[in-house]
Amino acid sequence: MTKRPRLPPRWFVRAAWSVHRGLYHVSGGRIGLRRPSNGQFGLMRLTATGRRSGTERSVMLAYVEDGPDIITLAMNGWGESHPGWWLNLQTDPNARIVLPDGTRFVTGRIAEGDERKRLWFLWKDLHTNIDAHAHFRSTPTDVVVLEPRPERQT
């Protein structure tokens, strides 16, 4: 029987996200991003339009690459609810991401069926305990595909 992993308290997860965003901001983007390599996921900044406010909202997210697509998980720190950025993308799928090599304009969508299984295994290669963490949620963790789109297209 696999032991269920422990998660840090919610306040700690939220504080870590705030510190990450703060370091990125204070450093002018020099700290906080990384490319996926050596069995580690990358870190990016995603900016989407708020579904209620209509203003830009930015978050720092882990990602892997799948050809030209960027793949991330809508996991909210393994909390029960969907993260706000994913709810925002469901309302307006056009977004902007910042990677270590520059800015890209993307369109977000959910991966389904065989594609979801294949992309989940990409993550599983990096995070062997991902299935145990996913069991903290009563619903499946959405796998989000960020597909490139031409600049400034809305």
Image (cartoon, rainbow, N blue to C red):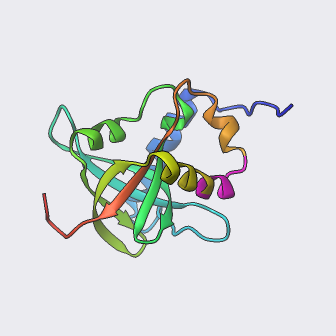
The one of 27 and 154 positioned closer to us in this rendering: 154
Residue at the image point whose x is 36% and y is 57% from the top: 146
| 42 with respect to 29 (left or right) | right
Residue sitting at x 14%, y 39% = 54
* Residue closest to the far bottom: 101
Towards the viewer: 66 or 21: 66
Q: Please identify the residue farthest to the front as the structure is shown.
A: 114
Task: Using the image, determine if residue 100 lies above or below residue 113.
Answer: below
- Residue 72 point in image, percent of width and height: 47, 52
| Residue 25 showing in the rendered view | no
Q: Is residue 69 visible?
A: yes
Q: Residue 58, position in %: x, y?
A: 32, 48
Magenta span contains residue 99: no
Residue at 45%, 27% in the rendered image = 81
Q: Which residues are magenta?
A: 122-128
Residue at the image point whose x is 24% and y is 66% from the top: 149
Residue 59 higher or lower than 83, as above or below = below
10 above or below 20?
Answer: above
Q: Quadrant of the image for the C terminus?
A: bottom left
Residue 143 placed where, x, y %?
A: 47, 46
Residue furthest right in the image: 1
Quarter of the picture containing the N terminus is: top right
